[in-house]
Structure formats: structure tokens, C-alpha cells
Image: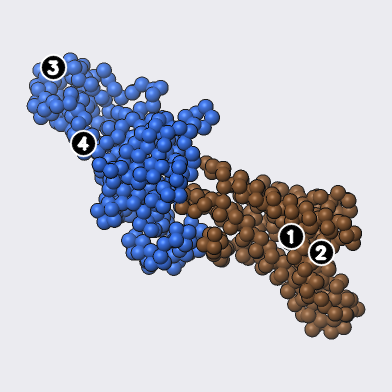
Amino acid sequence: MIAVLTVEARKLNRSLAALLAVAAPSLIAVFLFFNLLRGGKPQPWEMWTQSSTGIWAFFMLPMSVTALTALVAHMEHGPRAWDHLRALPVARWKLYAAKAICVMAVVAAMSLLNLALTLAAIHGAAAIKPEIMPTGALDVTAQVILMGKVLLAAILMIAIQLWTALRFASFVPALALGIGGTFFSVVATAAKQGVFFPWQMPVNMLAGEPWRAATALTLGAGAGTVVLLLAITHLSRREVL
Amino acid sequence: MAMAIETRDLTRRFGARTAVDRVSMTVPERAVYGFLGRNGAGKTTTLKMLLGLIRPSAGSAFVDGVDVARDRMGAARRVGALLEAHGFYVNLTGRENLDLTRTLLGVPASEVDRVLEVVEMRDNAARRVADYSLGMRQRLGLARAMLGAPPVLVLDEPTNGLDPDGIADMRRFLKSLPERTGATVLLSSHLLGEIEQTATHIGIVNEGRLVLEGELSRLKSDLAPEIAVRTDDPVRAAEVLRGWDLTVIASDDGLTARLRSGDDADRRSAELNRALIQAGLSVFAIGPRARSLEGIYRDVSQPSAQPQPETVR
């Protein structure tokens, strides 16, 4: 399995997926940087970090997962590499499991990069305009834990997106699903039922009501893991004609 | 003789359509086996079943003695494949692409240099595949198929995209492979001339069925000889030849009279020449013609629903 994982990771070298992994968190940091410069008064650290996590969980994470899973799947769909891979003496479930692990790892790296770039943006803006330097103490550990929960709650969404991207050779179904999912997540923000909607589960980690966060985390991580395993089983058993 | 590839009544149906119909093929060890057929005849489906990519509806396939359906991994270890779609990661270099497959195969890193040397691609190995020509990708695909020195190579249209020099190089290379590496080559192609110059054995598949198989030289010698005839009046010449109870085929090049197996083509040419002149015809040219693979192919791969339009009986 280590060999298959290594190969999967090496495929990302110089790829659009690697570019996306850097570009998406950078956009949030850039937005935050200019937003900070607009202000004249200092705000608590938590306000800015929550703001960044909110944008990430609510919008950028679903969109990034949509693009990332499509790009990772297209590495094989594009040059029709599945036949070559599946003809090798490697258990097929490992090929798909490696893809899933790789996507999860990239999303985790993007989450951490988002946090790191957020802090860099805040410090950068404060260096230019010292009066906006956030007040209070910065709890980095709490932020890392929050990002981790957002990631866990996103597993169901990632599993659905990855299965769609791997199942269909065309970009269209995966993109349509991702755009549709994000759209309904945004327009139905206030809906109580949103906690059961996979694309809204990550942002529910920021919800004020504890039951929402707990439900989204349990469903996102638990059902997500089950769906991911079912997806790997299905993909490895089906014939690619 | 030991068989590198063997199928027994291999069948694959897609719904009501039977793509491969009870194909029993045998590829001897160290052969270069040309697998011929029209588009949609069932070649690719057969190759995919040999590689374990799709499951047969019935029958079985063996690679180097290993049943593909029962032990896919064991069979996969014994076969290297160059498929029509190269499947390269264009963001990576040629060497990086080979190294990915090498890692999955679990063979030593030195294998990459060895196969690059064999296909004469060492100088270009550090370039990204996106910058490769089609011919270079084809050679890289061949290098990838040879990683780990599998005893069987399955090559789907290996001369696709090559220029004439590249085709000649590839032909020489493929012909020498069994002697140099001990490998058996199953070569799928629609280029009859290339197969004729490269293959030691052929199999022709038509409408899902294997209609002819054997050693190419033997097939050619066993087939009835032919005599090419050019006269000033092909219609009357055909009548004369039919009077000798011969099958006559008309084409733009003139007439072809097919003799019976064992006939002396030189002697029969002289007899027919006399007969045509006695019938008042001007004979421009007449003489035995060696049976070509193209002729064999055309004989056996006519669609079953259509008559043979060029045959005059």
C-alpha cells in the first residue's frame, strides 16, 4: 500500500491539483489581508480566525474539493490511464484507496495552509497598519482542532465527490454535483435541515448550537467513512470498458 | 510446444451483442503473433480479457500457463502491455512515468535505465511527456511494457504515429525481441504489411470469431497458388479461366485465377496463356503471384452478411 500511496503522491508533482492546493487557501488570505487594511480599530484574534475558517468551510472547501477530486480523477481519465493501472499486478482497491487517502491528505494540508496563511495575512496587515493588530491571545491549538473537525465533517462530501469524479470519465457530473451542492449549501444557510446536507456539514462546526456541530461531525465523519469504503469497493469491482 | 497465451472458447457478450465468440487462440512461446481484424471485430475485447481488464462471459484465458480469471495478479506479473491509449502523466518526465510503474511492479530502479536503453530513449528521459512526439510516447510505452522483463508482451497498434523510419525501427525491434529477451509478442494491428514483415504467427478475428490462425509461412505455402492475368478483355478472359474450373477474382490490377492446392503454378500459367491466346485475347502479362497476407486476410474476413463483390464466378 505504501508503494501505491507514494506513486499517487508523486503524480501530483507539477500538476494542477498541486497548484489548486496552494491557490485556494491563498485567496482567503489575500481577501483577509485587504479586509484587515480597510479597518481602523483592532479586533480580537478569534474574530479574524473564525472569519477565515468560515469562508473556508462554507465556500472554499466545497469548491476546492469539487475541483481537487475532479483533477485527481482526471489524471487517469484524461490520458485513459486506468487500463494501464488496472492491468498491473496491484490489488485494485489499493489504487482507489490511495486516491482517497491522497485527496484527504491534500485537503488536510490545505486546511493547515489556510490557517498558516491567515496568520501570515493578519501579521502582514498589522505590520503595514499597526493599529489593527488583533487583541487578546491567539489559541493556535484550538484553531488547529477546529480545522481538524471541519475536515472530519467534510469526509462525506469528499467521498461523494470523489466517487462521482472517479466513476464518470467526464468532468461534468462531478462539477455539476459540486457546484450544485455548494449552491444549495449557500442558499439554504439558515435551514435547520442543513446539518444533514453533506456540503453544509463542515460549516456547522462553527455553529453556536452544540447539537448541530455534534450531528454534523458524527454524520460527516461516520457516514463519510462508510460511503468512502463503499465507493472504493464499488470502483474496484466495476469493469472500466 | 509450450504456449505463452492460450484461450479456450473465450466469449464476451455485451447485452445481446456477442463481441468475442468462442475464441480459442494459441500463441507459442517466443512467437511474434499478429492479431488481425477489422475495427470492432473483437480484438481489443480479447486483449482486455487477456489482461484481466474485463471478465469473460464464458471460456478461459491463460497467460504463461496462469488462468487470468482465477489468478489475475499472477497473470499480470507475466505480461507487459502497450495499449492504444498511452496513459502517461504529461506533467511528469518520461523517466518519472517509468519510475511510477516500476514502483508499482516492485522491480529494481535499474530497470528504468535498462528499458530506456533498449528503446533508445535515455537522452529524452528527463523531458516532460507533454513535450514528446507521438513516436516518442510509443517508444516510452514499449519501455514501460518491458519493465520487469515479463515473458509476454501485448502490444496494441505499436506503430501508431510513427514515421516511416520509426516504423522500420519498430519492426526490427519487435522481430528481434523473442531472440533478445525470450519474450513472446502478441501484436494487434490493422497494418497488414507490417504484420506480414514482423509476425511469425497470425490470428485473424472476424465478427468476434477467430477465423484463421497459424504459422504465417505455413499458411502462405498451404494456400492455393494464384496466377495474375492482364488481357485486353477481362470479361472474356474470366470466361476462359472459368472454363478451367478456376475461381477468378477481378480487381483494378486485372484478374487473379486461384489454383487448387498443390497445382504447379508455372506450368498452369503456360497452359492458361495458351488458352487465352487461342481464344483470341491479347495477353499483356501472366504469371504466378505469391499469396500475400492481405489476400489471406481478405479471404477470411469478409462480413458474413455481404457477398464478395470482387469475385467473378
Quarter holding the N terminus of chain A is bottom right
Residue that carries the numbered disc 2 in the rendered image? A54
Give the SS element for disc 2.
helix
Kind of residue at disc 3: Ala
Q: Are marks 4 and 2 in contact (CB under 8 Å)?
A: no
Residue that carries the numbered disc 3 in the rendered image? B279
**Mark 3 to mark 2 CA distance (whole Å):** 98 Å
Give chain B's shade: blue
In the rendered image, which quarter is residue A116 located in?
A: bottom right
**Mark 3 to mark 1 CA distance (whole Å):** 93 Å
- Point out the tag, 1 or 2, that comes first from the N-terminus: 2
**Mark 4 to mark 2 CA distance (whole Å):** 76 Å
Please name the residue shown 39% across and 26% down the image: B303
Tell me: A132 left or right of B283: right
Give chain A's shade: brown
Tell me: A7 left or right of B123: right
